[in-house]
Amino acid sequence: MKVTTLGEFIIERQADFPYATGELTRLLSDIAIAGKIVNREVNKAGLVDILGAQGEENIQGEQQQKLDVYANNQFISALKAGGEVIGLASEENEDYVNMDGGVSSNAKYVVMIDPLDGSSNIDVNVSIGTIFSIYRRITFSGPATLEDFLQKGSEQVAAGYIIYGSSTMMVYTTGFGVNGFTLDPSIGEFCLSHPSIKIPQTGIIYSINEGNYVHFPDGVKKYIKYCQEEDINSDRPYTSRYIGSLVADFHRNMLKGGIYIYPETAKSPKGKLRLLYECNPLAFIAEQAGGVASNGYKRIMDIEAKELHQRTPLYIGSSDMVEKVEGFIAMYAEKVST
Ligand code: P6P
């Protein structure tokens, strides 16, 4: 069977964009190259002194792992060199990085990225991931502005993730479906392995940190109990699977069916996950694969972005499962309000 590399696929699918002039093609290739470099370090993390905390905190107040910093620098360098990006916002940087000047002066795109999500798992060899989101700039010239980044998720041009797991995969969409590519280390190429991914309409896997149960909204508590009830006709009790790495949980649920939930909690009253570089890109992918992504009340990609590191609750995965938990949330919100 002919192997289709990511590069060949991106060029073939450039025809999806009637006026394509190759910049997005180049941008996606730049991300893939940086992903391969990060993968090389992730794969040997245990062998070199790159483990453990950098000894600094990122703007999230999280202990920065050395690989976080390394990954962030790799993606920034690759996108700077590629010249297709006017600005980049990263979980690891308080403000956005302006790429204006030199090869990027006329760049059309801004990128938002979580360079290494789930990094607390680095030292224990659990799958981690990169999440990226691509928009056209909305200002016309000069350096990127905050306005270019604070766009609704529905304006995304492309989105994807790289999962560094038992194998390394890049999964992305440009609005024409979702395709997955597995890295073949023997040739150093991402090869098409999961064409036209579709999330099953329902599933039997729910992913949530039940350690926060007492702080969950009542509707979420009721949904968890619903998942745990015995009902053969609806394949319940479901299976609980929570890796603590969003990309890994999302990827498994996308292939097998399931729901990932990170609701408001006492520690994170607006939710923990970030709208711009975690929730919007995965929401774009989920919807393109036939799934749903909401904040419990509204579509994630319709949420107005007010700040770079804005948080939101996230309910994402199989459409039937997200709609079910939204029903419980609505039911119990009414009870609270009456
Ligand atoms: P908790 C990792 O920090 C992350 O952003 C996601 O990858 C993961 O699903 C979640 O947070 C884990 O958070 O509070 O359950 O440890």
Image: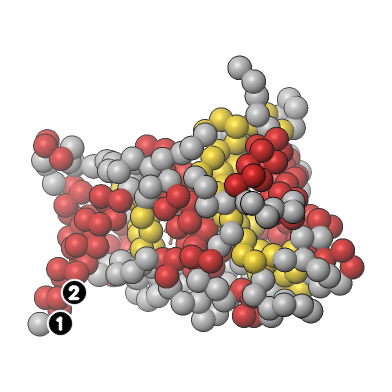
Describe residue 336's horizontal placement relative to residue 291 as left or right.
left
The image quarter in which residue 54 lies: bottom right
Q: Amino acid at mark 1?
A: Ser
Taking the spot 68% from the left edge, 78% from the top edge, the residue there is 139
The correct choice, above or below, for 307 with respect to 24 in the image is below
Point out which mark residue 7 bears.
none
Secondary structure under the numbered disc 1 in the rendered image: helix
Residue density around tag 1, few if under 14, some if 14–19, many if 20 or more, within 10 Å: few
Q: Quadrant of the N terminus?
A: top right
Asked whether 314 or 191 is in front, the reply is 191
Point out which mark residue 333 bears.
2
Asked whether 278 or 283 is in front, the reply is 283
Taking the spot 71% from the left edge, 59% from the top edge, the residue there is 72
Q: Residue 6 at what x, y percent from top left?
A: 67, 37
Count the labels in the image. Answer: 2
The image quarter in which residue 133 lies: bottom right
**Could you tell me if the residues under marks 2 and 1 are in contact, i.e. CB atoms within 8 Å?**
yes
Q: Is residue 147 visible?
A: yes
Q: Which residue is mark 1?
A: 337
Residue density around tag 2, few if under 14, some if 14–19, many if 20 or more, within 10 Å: some
Q: Residue 20 at what x, y percent from top left?
A: 69, 53
Q: Residue 99 at what x, y percent from top left?
A: 79, 69
Residue at the extreme right: 102
